[in-house]
Image (spheres, rainbow, N blue to C red):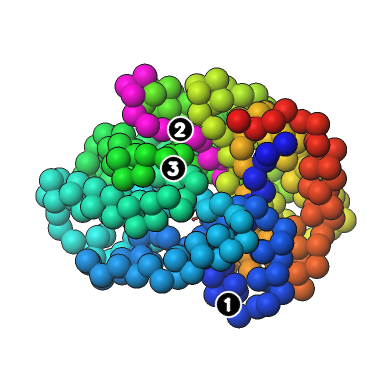
Amino acid sequence: MGLKVGTAVNTDALVDDPEYRAITATQFSSVTPENVMKWGLVEPTRGRYEWAEADRLVRFARAHHQVVRGHTLVWHNQLPEWVTAGTWTRAQLRGILRKHVTDQVTHFKGQISAWDVVNEAFNEDGTLRDSLWLQKLGPGYIADAFRWAHRADPKAVLYYNDYNLEGIGPKSDAVYRLVRQLRREGVPVQGVGLQTHLDTLYDFPEKMQFNMERFARLGVDVAITEADVRIPLPVSPTEGLAQVADYSQTMQACLAVPRCVSYTVWGFGDAYSWVPAVFDGEGSADIFDENLAPKPAYYALQQDLRLAAGAPPRP
Ligand code: XIL
């Protein structure tokens, strides 16, 4: 039914681990660089771009007939120190951001199907995050970033991407209003990415399908961009089942909405997951285990996809 199924890729593992490489090549139709397109990695020193790692992933994707989701252009994390430590006037910082967005999108022009242009700009209560960008540039930096990216590659589909955006709540309401407003103003925002970092400790996000449908009605694509379901360790049988149900429900919500065009997991193997380093005492979040053997969640997603052979076609 045309849904892309993707994974975030750890480019070190892609080089070092043949089994990881084989799964990446054969199980997915879309890849997202987990880190190597972030500003801090592509331009650690001002004016000296380091594209090699990202270029390698783009070549890998092409060789395996996969699309690439570009991640990410404007974010408050993993910035180069020269950006965060500098003292800039508003005009200087705006120029720096414009150059970054323009240069990066231009470098990959024609090779990226979708860009996460702005990442995680909102707080949980629906106010804008007090980032360097908001502080120095004001809320207009969001529209600017989309315009600059569109100018550099008019064919790439441009996304706003965030976490805790899956259900209905103050944050997704705020993003909904922002996207509606930007589109009224003719700003080229063309997709909304729901990161979908879930945790079996919490309830499943309320009305996920309805939420995707309301975004779709604004005329944008929707994507699940970073799915994983972490579990407090050690994993109990109940939590293990909850994980399978969570993965399956997110996939089914996506399948039910024709404009949900891709479903990406934030890494497929527990051995390489970002979760244990960031969420104390939690792990086992991925669909393959520490030895890269498929877990029940993998088979559940496969089953959902098989049963959805007759689902509405993606545009
Ligand atoms: C994470 C990576 O997985 C880690 O390897 C890195 O140390 C920090 O960033 N939301 C995002 C991703 O948009 O870029 C983050 O990725 C996870 C949360």
* Between discs 1 and 3, the one toward the N terminus: 1
* Residue neighbourhood size for the residue with mark 2, other residues' Cα within 10 Å, grouped as few (<14), some (14–19), many (≥20): many
Which residue appears farthest toward the bottom when viewing the image? Answer: 16
- Classify 24 as above or below 92: below
* Between discs 3 and 2, the one toward the N terminus: 3
Residue 98 percent coordinates (x, y): 24, 48
Q: Mark 3 points at which residue?
A: 156
Q: What element carries label 3?
A: loop
Q: Tell me the amino acid under the disc marked 2.
A: Gln
Task: Tell me, yes or no, whether the highlighted magenta stretch contains residue 16.
Answer: no
Name the mark on residue 280: none
- In this view, the residue in front, 62 or 253, is 62
Is the N terminus in the top left, top right, bottom left or bottom right quadrant?
top right
Is the C terminus in the top left, top right, bottom left or bottom right quadrant?
top right
Task: Please report the residue visible at 28 percent of the width from the left and 55 percent of the height from the top.
Answer: 103
Inter-mark Cα distance, 2 to 1: 33 Å
One can see residue 200 in this view: yes
- Classify 170 as above or below 29: above
Q: Quadrant of residue 61?
A: bottom right
- In this view, the residue in front, 146 or 290, is 146
Inter-mark Cα distance, 3 to 2: 9 Å
Q: Mark 1 points at which residue?
A: 15
Q: Tell me the amino acid under the disc marked 3.
A: Ala
Single out the mark in the foreground, 1 or 3.
3
Q: Tell me the amino acid under the disc marked 1.
A: Val
Q: What stretch is highlighted in magenta?
A: 184-195
Q: What element carries label 2?
A: loop
Name the mark on residue 190: 2
Residue 86 percent coordinates (x, y): 18, 61
Task: Please report the residue visible at 50 percent of the width from the left and 62 percent of the height from the top.
Answer: 58
Task: Tell me, yes or no, whether the highlighted magenta stretch contains residue 189.
Answer: yes
